[in-house]
Amino acid sequence: MTAIIQIENLSKQYGSGTKALSDVSLDIQEGEIIALLGPNGAGKTTLISVICGLVVPTGGTVRVGGHDIRTDWRAARKLIGLVPQEIALEPFEKVMNCVRFTRGLYGEGPDDAYIEQVLRSLALWDKRDAATRELSGGMKRRVLIAKALAHRPKVLFLDEPTAGVDVALRREMWEVVDRLRREGVTIILTTHYLEEAEEMADRIGVINHGRLLLVRPTSELMGEFGRKTLTIEVT
Ligand code: ATP
């Protein structure tokens, strides 16, 4: 089976300074949930940004659904939904309109039945007519996910979906990911938390100093290294 994402020997150096990625190779299969685990500055956001075509790599290739992200950006980008770390929403816009608008940006026609399905799966349907500024932090994060799903991408990227949120919101995010998993969405998420990676992901990739140190099925990794060792390694 061809992987939905194929990453080969990817590297990124910012200017003449930091080497943020060094020779990263990884295949991600459709329907898989993979967590990229690593401390501050490890290169997680850079990796996601390169895969999504937002940052140009210094070397290597990325294919999404067989499309090269550099030469066939439009086709590749349609398959990708990205939820960035920062919450940036138009405060006076209604939830439903936010999602409709994002769909339009991808050149997709209106499909309110699909948007309803997305908002229901994110427990946001009751808030469809609320302005985003009226929502709680957890709801705002779910609106960002709804926007990222607006054009029916095959792959969803969540960049530190639980950074700076409390335990209850973190659990809520885990449940959202679980629901999306059942719908067959491929998910790549970044996190600092081992227990979060363990909770959500089928495979965990450990990244540090721009290198993908290892990628293993979650159960295998936890069995081999144990939580204590891994926590020491990545913090
Ligand atoms: P965090 O968990 O703190 O978000 P991260 O694992 O996502 O960190 P990156 O943001 O990818 O790490 O950063 C990797 C390295 O690249 C860091 O040393 C960072 O300072 C550097 N870096 C990131 N973006 C830029 C940029 N635009 N210009 C120069 N250096 C950058």
Image (spheres, grey):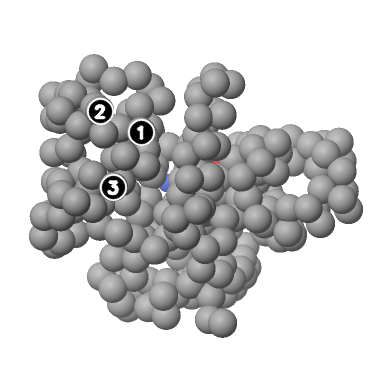
Looking at the picture, tell me which residue is in the foreground, 190 or 130: 130
Looking at the picture, tell me which residue is in the foreground, 56 or 34: 34
Q: Distance between the residues labelled 3 and 1?
A: 10 Å
Sequence-wise, which precedes: disc 3 or disc 1?
A: 3
Q: How far apart are marks 2 and 3 (CA)?
A: 12 Å
In the picture of the structure, the residue carrying the numbered disc 3 is 117
Splitting the image into 4 quarters, where does residue 136 fall?
top left
In the picture of the structure, the residue carrying the numbered disc 2 is 126
Looking at the picture, tell me which residue is in the foreground, 225 or 17: 225
Which amino acid does the dot numbered 2 rest on? Asp
Q: How far apart are marks 2 and 1 (CA)?
A: 7 Å
Residue at (35, 27) in percent of width and height: 139
Which amino acid does the dot numbered 3 rest on? Gln
From the Cβ of disc 2, is ligand 1 less than 8 Å away?
no
Looking at the picture, tell me which residue is in the foreground, 72 or 168: 168
From the Cβ of disc 3, is ligand 1 less than 8 Å away?
no
Residue 127 placement (x, y as % from top left)? 24, 27
Left or right of 3, for residue 69: left
Query: Could you classify mark 2 by the number of other residues whose Cα lies within 10 Å: few (under 14), some (14-19), or many (20 or more)?
Result: few
Considering the numbered disc 2 on the image, is that residue within a helix, a strand or a loop? helix
In the rendered image, is residue 49 in sight? Answer: no
Total count of labels = 3
The reply to whether the C-beta atoms of the residues labelled 2 and 1 are less than 8 Å apart is yes
Quarter of the rendering occupied by the N terminus: bottom right
The reply to whether the C-beta atoms of the residues labelled 3 and 1 are less than 8 Å apart is no
Residue 66 placement (x, y as % from top left)? 42, 80
Left or right of 47, for residue 52: left
Query: Could you classify mark 3 by the number of other residues whose Cα lies within 10 Å: few (under 14), some (14-19), or many (20 or more)?
Result: some
Left or right of 77, for residue 92: left
In the picture of the structure, the residue carrying the numbered disc 1 is 123
Quarter of the rendering occupied by the C terminus: top right
Which amino acid does the dot numbered 1 rest on? Ala
